Image: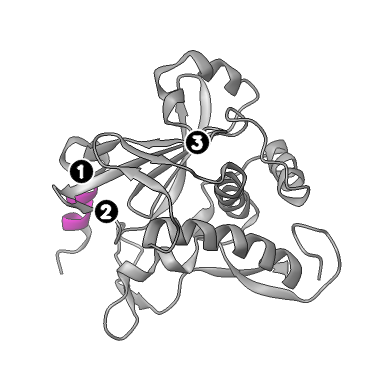
Amino acid sequence: MKCKLCHNDKELRNSHIIPEFFYKPLYDKRHRFNVIPLNEEQKFRYEQKGLRERLLCDDCENKLSKWEDYVRRIFYGGKEILITNGNPIKIEGLDYAKFKFFQLSLLWRASISELDFFKGVSLGPHEEKIRQMLLNEDPGSKLKYPCLFIMVLMEPNKVLDDFIYPPIFLRINGHRTYRFIFGGGFWIYFVSSHTKMLNSSKISKFFLNENGLLLIPLIPANRIDFFLNLAKDFVKYNKN
């Protein structure tokens, strides 16, 4: 079968979309996590692995895995970087290309996926542009498909690291965006042909910078309408 990244006919791996290490905080002692019903059609169930799909050949899977491993060591230790606590959190010394490739690869895989979980992501012509960036290892500039990462606080010292939610399309200030929830918060991707206009906006300082600087704002969950509405839906569809 044809690999989605290199387009060569090779045996395909069962690839994950959201890296497995982001599912780790969700697992119980039996290595299961709960899939919570949020509408009348869904039922409560357990899963033992994150969502996977046959998308990539061995070579391309290994390429993306290197970028994921770099981010894993940043989130869960093992990579020496400078982190200054506060609001926003300040991370310095990041490898811009590796972190950017991680961000882009996740967005791109969600778009090419046929899994129902990722049906909210459809990049159109940007899908091929991002594929070329990944294939040719071209991270682009800070404003080329930038991503805003907002960390959500459930408690003063507890981030939302045990929650993953389907990505959705949102329009923000005239820009097409896709919002993912995993790894402790919101990942908001700006996908449009005029993202350079964001350079003068206040949020541009929170995009990954070419010099390896990343600022991560912290927002309490009780100040976000999404979580207030989610709690109401949970009660509504889990009465029995």
In front: mark 3 or mark 2? 3
Disc 3: which residue: 208
Give the residue type at disc 1. Ala
Disc 1: which residue: 221
Name the residue nearer the viewer: 212 or 30.
212
Distance, label 1 to label 3, CA atoms, is 23 Å
Instruction: Classify 134 as above or below 239.
Output: above
Residue 54 in the magenta stretch? The answer is no
Magenta region, residue range: 229-236
Circles 2 and 1: CB atoms closer than 8 Å: yes
Name the residue nearer the viewer: 35 or 140.
140
Can I make out residue 231 in this image? yes
Number of residues whose C-alpha sits closer than 10 Å to that of mark 2, classed few (under 14), some (14–19) or many (20 or more):
many
Residue at the image point whose x is 56% and y is 15% from the top = 197
Colouring convention used in this rendered image of the protein = one colour
In front: mark 1 or mark 3? 3
Classify mark 2: helix, strand or loop.
Answer: loop
Quadrant of image for the C terminus: bottom left
Give the residue type at disc 2. Leu
Residue 231 in the magenta stretch? The answer is yes
Can I make out residue 43 in this image? no
**Residue 89 position within the rendered picture, expressed as x and y whole percent measured from the top left:** 31, 39
Instruction: Classify 82 as above or below 238.
Output: above
Disc 2: which residue: 160
